[in-house]
Image (cartoon, rainbow, N blue to C red):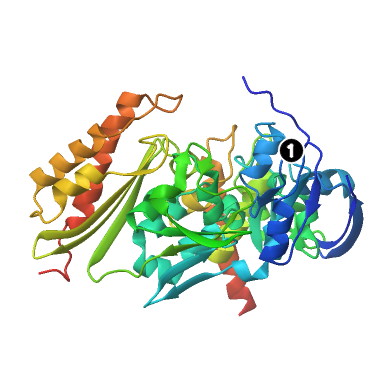
Amino acid sequence: MTLFYRRMPKFDYIRPSTVEEALAALSHGEPVRNQVFSGGTDLIPKLKSRAIKAPPNVIDLKGIKSLGYVDFQSDDGLRIGANATIREVAQSTSVLANYTALAEGTGLIASNQVQHRGTVVGNICNAVPSADSAPPLLAHDACVVCVGGAGERIVPIADFFVAPSVTALAPGEIVKEIHLPRPKSGERSVYLKLASRGRMDLAVVGVAVLVVVKDHLIQQVRIGLGSAAPVPIRASQAEAALIGQRVTPELIAQAAAIAASHTTTRSSHRASAAYRREMIEVLVRRALTQVTVPTSSHV
Amino acid sequence: MKNIDLALTVNGRTEELTIPPNRTLLELLREDLQLTGAKEGCGHGECGACMIILNGKTVNSCLILAAEVEGADIVTIEGLKQGDQLHPVQQAFVEHSGMQCGFCTSGQVLAAKALLDENPHPTPEEIRDGMAGSFCRCTGYTKIFESVEAAAHLLQDHQGAKL
């Protein structure tokens, strides 16, 4: 049983105003490195419960005013800065219009209070397999712009999650932004979250699907799965079974079964591994059906 | 630890304090300012009993370091009523018995106010969704949602009266 402490452990507080200052502070700290945060909605509970050791300094990134953007350009796509809150992304007109799965995934994270502080970048840096922003970012084929002493580097989202709570960030690096490519014409996407209390629970499983269907043929498909493996994953085998094929209920059912058979689900107090695997199949089938149903604008 | 000097506005008053860096905003409000309306229900940002309004947005104060709110504008439950005049949301909760033990009520009222500020005519589903971050162990939520619906009507009447 986890002991729950009422008071915070001891640490000092730094508020840099530039990325360079933040990186300089980040590369120090003994015996535990200094720790960055923006929303604090993951860091503070971890410090309180002693799940992590208190660093000498917590580094508040919110002093870096230039990182709060949610910026959509039709030729470049969407860039989400490190300090952009979950609510800002979930309610952004550009996101709602162009990245449905992301709008739905971020909109289902916790409460409005948490969404007003927590950030999407923080959600992926926390890197739990159930993160609701992760399957949509996988389906949208996002990439993560990391910045450290050696400069910037770009990590595809599928490579960003290394293990539960472990990302591809090197020591001394932070995420500057998440970049989603510009949407293709005819793209449709959705995020489905299975949880007993809706938004407020972590996802038992989460499924994001993005497709482009033309003349009943699947031209493009990406399926992101949460809580199906130690990290958020793409259902690549299911995708391979769908690409170029004609949309039918049988094909969808087949692909959903393939997706579920390639998961390594875990039993926890929320659900058993077997239930999770079954629900992956159910949600992938529902999500594929939802995004391939002809709308009035389709012939 | 190095203490930090803070100046911020709470319920319209300027407050200047010196606090340790590991103080949470909830601790500052309850222990340094004696504004005990915000409660520690869970301490990790799930129950909403510690909710306050920070720069116009509802937040869980247990998840915020006091050091983060330099220059901020904060409204707590204590700041809702004007003199002896209850805020329409408070009035609705009183009239419709939107509380039993009252521990979650500060957060529920603020969540309702924020919801109705953004969406003056919420559907029942929108009320449930907008209030999702405020847990209650006593009421089963029915009276809380009825209070929110009543508050929506009260606020409409007030708007009508102003025009």
| Disc 1 secondary structure class | loop
Residue that lies at the very extreme toward the bottom in this rendered image: B163
Determine the image quadrant of residue B87: bottom right
Choose between A254 and A52: the one closer to the eye. A52
Total labels: the figure holds 1
Any part of residue B135 in sight: yes
Tell me the residue at 8%/43% (across/down). Answer: A250
Horizontal arrangement in the rendering, residue A43 relative to residue A175 (left or right): right
Horizontal arrangement in the rendering, residue A237 relative to residue B104 (left or right): left
Horizontal arrangement in the rendering, residue B20 relative to residue A227 (left or right): right
Considering the image in quadrants, where does the N terminus of chain A appear?
top right
Considering the image in quadrants, where does the C terminus of chain A appear?
bottom left
**Residue A100: x and y, percent?**
35, 61
Dot 1 alpha-carbon crowd within 10 angstroms: few under 14, some 14 to 19, many 20 or more: many
- Amino acid of disc 1: Ala
**Residue A243: x and y, percent?**
15, 54
The residue beneath circle 1 is: A54
**Residue A137: x and y, percent?**
40, 55
**Residue A104: x and y, percent?**
39, 55
Question: B101 above or below B154?
Answer: above
Horizontal arrangement in the rendering, residue B143 relative to residue A180 (left or right): right
Choose between B58 and A103: the one closer to the eye. A103
Residue that lies at the very extreme toward the front in this rendered image: A150
Tell me the residue at 67%/69% (across/down). Answer: A65
Any part of residue B66 in sight: no
Tell me the residue at 25%/49% (across/down). Answer: A287
- Mark 1 — on which chain does it sit? A
